[in-house]
Amino acid sequence: MSTFFPKGNELKRQWFLVDAAGVPVGRLSSLVAEVLAGKNKPTWTPFIDTGDHVIVINADKAVFTGKKIVQKVYHEVPNTQPGSMKSIPAKVMMESHPERIVEKAVKGMLPKGPLGRQMYRKLKVYAGASHDHAAQAPQPLEVIKSK
């Protein structure tokens, strides 16, 4: 007996489409991170990228639960100069760049290092309902919305 490890040419990558309208950001990002990492497949291996591609649409309609829309703050450091860190409230970020909120949440749930960066490259996030990946024929992926 030996353990099965999938080879690169044996992997069949699929494309999934997720509609973020009315879905809490945390629930959405945990499901997307699971699919990107390939943990929903029986061939999942910790040191191989077995995940699929994910397209997230309607990122501007994703919601925060509780008071997170008012209290949550995103920090950006544009360069390494002292005092260059900028703090942006979630409400302002949702109005200006809603796709960055989903991207940051998913990236934080992926492994750190080269493997996590490889998984992150398979994520495509769009603020509106249209996307540029119709040729890949993405399959819909259902997210359980909050009660």
Image (tube, grey):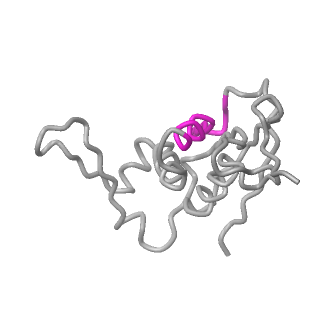
**Most distant residue in the left direction:** 82
> Does 45 appear above or below 65?
above
Q: Is residue 2 left or right of residue 83?
A: right
- Residue drawn at (23%, 47%) of the image: 86
Write the residue at 67% across / 26% down: 132
Pinpoint residue 41: horizontal percent, then vertical percent. Answer: 80, 52
The image quarter in which residue 79 lies:
top left
Is residue 97 on the magenta stretch? no
Taking 1 as reference, is 59 left or right? Answer: left
Number of numbered callouts drawn: 0
Q: Identify the residue at horizontal 61%, vertical 63% (top origin).
A: 27
Is residue 118 one of those drawn in magenta? yes
Magenta segment boundaries in residue numbering: 115-131
Given residues 33 and 132, the one toward you in this image is: 33
Indicate whether 134 appears above or below 82. Answer: above
Instruction: Please tell me in which quadrant of the rendered image residue 50 appears.
Output: top right
Q: Position of residue 71 (x, y in %)?
A: 34, 67
**Quarter of the image where the N terminus is located:** bottom right
Q: Is residue 71 above or below residue 130?
A: below
In the visual, does 83 lie left or right of 101? left
Q: Nearer the viewer, residue 11 or 40?
A: 11
The image shows residue 131 at horizontal and vertical percentages of 66, 31
Q: Nearer the viewer, residue 91 or 134?
A: 134
Q: Which residue corresponds to the image point at 64% horizontal and 43% vertical from the top-left? A: 56
Position above or below: 51 against 39: above
Location of the C terminus by quadrant is bottom right
Measured from the top left, where is residue 80 in percent x and y? Answer: 18, 38
